[in-house]
Amino acid sequence: MCTSKEVFDVIMRNDTVFFTGVPNTERTYLLEFCYANNKNINYNYEMSDLVAMGGRNMMLDDKPMMCAQVRELTLEQRILKRAIDIAVSTVALIVAGPVMLGCALAIKLDDGGPVIYVQERIGRFGRVFRIYKFRSMRLDAGKMGPQLSAQQGQGDARLTKVGRFIRAHHLD
């Protein structure tokens, strides 16, 4: 607990107090002191404060409480979010299209193999979905089973020349 007499003396000499970087437990103690002594208080908030801001006041017996509930998006919000996702994705595909076409041509010309690599991932609610990536490894790279790639692809013999480039520039 913050019990320094100097801190309380400084608070008492001022009408307004600013707190920053004070741990929650000490801040609560100091806030109560300031409130009891009619001091204006300014402080930076923590995540718990942000959650509480969205809450509502309630009484539990004779104790005032803040109720902060986690809420899912409403149907309208989900529809709007989906529409924005599709619109932004469409614009991004149009803008990135020429770069993607260049990557695809380079991969095809490098070794003649397939351009796209398909991988399964697990998403929300455990739903399995597929991602499609530009292939950056040789066709026989999977013969030795799954492996972690070397740092930034340096020294990984499974990478193609084009694969090394597209990974280095995050184009895969």
Image: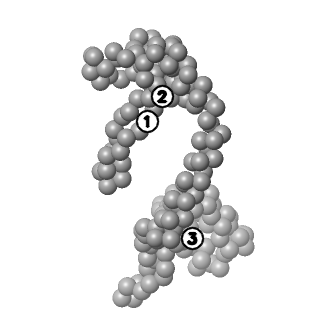
Label 3 environment density (alpha carbons within 10 Å; few <14, some 14–19, many ≥20): some
Q: Residue at x 43, y 35 (%)?
A: 132
Q: Earlier in the sequence, mark 3 or mark 1?
A: 3
- Residue placed under numbered mark 1 in the picture: 132
Label 1 environment density (alpha carbons within 10 Å; few <14, some 14–19, many ≥20): few
- Residue placed under numbered mark 3 in the picture: 31
Q: Secondary structure at mark 1?
A: strand
- Separation of marks 3 and 1 at Cα, in angstroms: 53 Å
Q: 37 and 112: which one is in front?
A: 112
Q: Residue at x 67, y 63 (%)?
A: 18
Quarter-wise, where is residue 61 in the image? bottom left
Q: Where does the image place residue 97, in percent across and percent down from the top left?
A: 61, 35
Relative horizontal placement of residue 40, taking residue 160 as reference (left or right): right
Residue type at the position of mark 1:
Tyr
Residue type at the position of mark 3:
Leu
- Separation of marks 3 and 2 at Cα, in angstroms: 56 Å
Mark toward the viewer: 3 or 2:
2
Q: Is residue 103 above or below residue 123?
A: above
- Residue placed under numbered mark 2 in the picture: 134
Mark toward the viewer: 3 or 1:
1
Q: Earlier in the sequence, mark 3 or mark 2?
A: 3
Q: Where does the image place residue 153, in percent across and percent down from the top left?
A: 47, 18
Residue type at the position of mark 2:
Phe
Q: Where does the image place residue 123, in percent across and percent down from the top left?
A: 36, 48
Relative horizontal placement of residue 95, taking residue 145 as reference (left or right): right
